[in-house]
Image: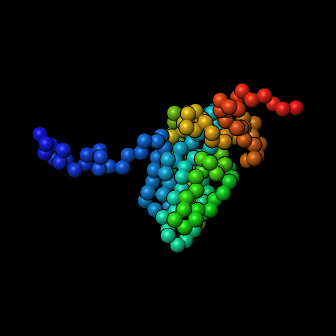
Amino acid sequence: MLASCTLNFDEQTDQVYNAAAGVNDRSGEVDVLNALVVASTTGSGTVVATLVNNDQTHSDSLRSIAGSGADASLTVTPGGPTDIAANGLLNLATDGRNFISGPEVKLGRNVRITFSFDRAKAITLTVPVVGNTAEYAGVALPSASASSSTDVSPSASPASSSATPKP
């Protein structure tokens, strides 16, 4: 009975496990980690991911995010920092404002998007669309009537929802 643990070398403890809702790609010079779309309404949301530059000497930058394949009609309005330092990271959840729009953006669905970089190869992923609750409540979202990339709707938090506006 003690030997049963070593019968199969593909046990869950030997495999990378992502406890988050997003998807990962570690195939290139830039890792795309926990990629997903956070949305509160159908039709628009925010692309979230952590981009890790594995190059020890050269910085890179996020050139664009775009819909891909059957989801090529998705529109992504870029915003926020794009530079990824050598051996550094860029967190699009806290630093980015990459708003995505299109009828394919619906809670519970998946959309196909491509991350393009100046130096690293492009990475295409099928990512889930999740609600702006729990751990994603602080992600900036496009406003319902956003006419430009600067319009954001702050997520409500317990502290801010009870705040009284000052005159």
Left or right of 70? Residue 165 is right
Q: Quadrant of residue 60?
A: bottom right
Can you say whether 81 is above or below 135 in the image? below
For the N terminus, the image quarter is top left
Q: Residue at x 55, y 58 (%)?
A: 89
Residue sitting nearer the eye, 118 or 72: 118
Which percent across, then down, holds residue 34? 49, 47
Q: Is residue 134 shown to the viewer in this render?
A: yes
Q: Residue at x 29, y 46 (%)?
A: 13
For the C terminus, the image quarter is top right
Q: Residue at x 62, y 62 (%)?
A: 83
- The furthest residue to the bottom: 57
Residue sitting nearer the eye, 43 or 30: 30
Q: Residue at x 32, y 49 (%)?
A: 15
Which percent across, then down, holds residue 138? 63, 39
Residue sitting nearer the eye, 124 or 152: 152
Which percent across, then down, holds residue 28? 46, 62
Q: Across the whole image, how many numbered discs are drawn on residues?
A: 0
Q: Is residue 66 shown to the viewer in this render?
A: no
